[in-house]
Image (tube, grey):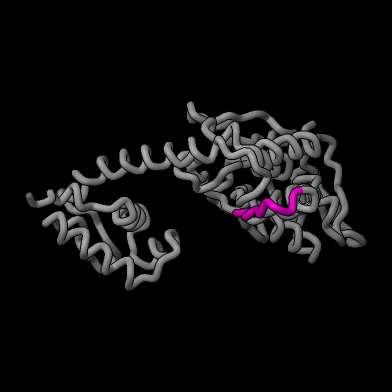
Amino acid sequence: MNESPAASMEWSDIKVFLAIARTGTLMAAARQTGQSQPTMGRRLKALEASLSLTLFQRTSDGFVLTAEGESVLGHAERMEEQALAFQRELEGREQRLEGALRVSSSDWFGVYVLSPMLAGFLRQHPGVSIELLTDARLLNLARREADLVFRIQPFDEPYILQRKLMHMDYALYAAAGQPHPVAGDGEGCALVTLDVAYRDFPDAVWLRRMLPKARTAFGSNNREAQARLCAAGIGLAVLPVALGGQTPGIERVELGEPPPGRDVWLGYHQDLRRLARLRALVDRTIESLAS
C-alpha cells in the first residue's frame, strides 16, 4: 500500500516551509533555522515534489505564498503549535538546573540592567547557559523564540504568565562640563531623541512638549547610541536613569518636570512554569530588580 504524501511529510520539512513563509527569503529562513541556504532550497523543492504542489511563487523580491501555499499554511501552523506544546510540556517537567535559556529584552536594558544580574546567576548555576537577544521585535513565546521576555508593555496573550517587574525613571541629560542653557521653549537647543517610528513614545512626546522650538539633531531607536551622542555634545537627550547614570560624560538637566517613566514587565509561557532553571532565573530577577 502506497504512503500518502501527507503521511510521508516530516516535521523538519514543515519547519522549513514555515520559516520561508514568515521571512520571505531563503537567506533569512536559513539564519532563522540554522541551516544553509542551499539546504533550505533543496528541502523546499523536495517538500513541493512530495506534495505535488507549488507552495511559493519565486519573485525578484523573494518567496510569496501561492494559493496552494496559503491553504497549507494554516495546517502547518497547527502542526507547529502541537509540536511546540509537546516540547514545552516535556521541558516543563525538567527539574535539573542545567540547560539553555533564551532571554529577550531591549538593547540598553540587556546591557546595563540584565547583564550584571545574569552574571551572578550564571556563577551560581554553572550548568545553565543563557542566550540574550536584544531585539525591538515582540518575540513569540509560544514558538520558543524566547523563554523569558522583558518589555515595556504588558503581554496580552492568554498563555503568558507575567508580572510587572519594576518602574524605570527617566531624566534629561546633557554633555557634562559644557554650557547647556535651556530657553523656556527650547529655541536654540539641539535634541538627541528617538527616531520618527517611535515619536509617540511618552518621553519623546514629553520632550517636544517641554522644548517645542528645539531642533532634532539626531534620532535613533537605540538608547545607547543616544547616550553616546549626548556625551559627545550633540544635544540634550531623555534617557533611562539606569543608562544615563552609567554613561560617562553626561549630567542631568532639570526643567521643573521630570520625563515620564516606564514600567518593565517580564513574561514566560505557562507551560514552562515547572522548568527549574527558568523558575530559578525568574526568582533571581525578581529578587534583584523588582521595585
The percent position of residue 114, horizontal first and vertical second, equals 73, 48
Does the image show residue 225?
yes
Residue 127 part of the magenta-drawn span: yes
The percent position of residue 238, horizontal first and vertical second, equals 74, 48
Q: Quadrant of residue 216?
A: bottom right
Residue 107 part of the magenta-drawn span: no
- Check the image and report above or below for 24 versus 152: below
Q: Residue furthest top?
A: 158
Q: Quadrant of residue 75?
A: top left
Q: Residue furthest bottom?
A: 38
- Write the residue at 66% across / 54% down: 129
Does the image show residue 214?
no
The percent position of residue 225, horizontal first and vertical second, equals 69, 61
Q: Residue furthest front?
A: 1
**Along the line of sight, the residue nearer the viewer: 19 or 61:** 19
Write the start and end of the magenta stretch as one range.
125-133
- Write the residue at 52% across / 44% down: 138
The percent position of residue 59, horizontal first and vertical second, equals 23, 65
**Along the line of sight, the residue nearer the viewer: 207 or 41:** 41
Residue 66 placement, left or right of 20: left
Residue 171 placement, left or right of 67: right
> Magenta residues: mostly which secondary structure?
strand
**Along the line of sight, the residue nearer the viewer: 111 or 80:** 80
Q: Quadrant of the C terminus?
A: top right
**Along the line of sight, the residue nearer the viewer: 1 or 241:** 1
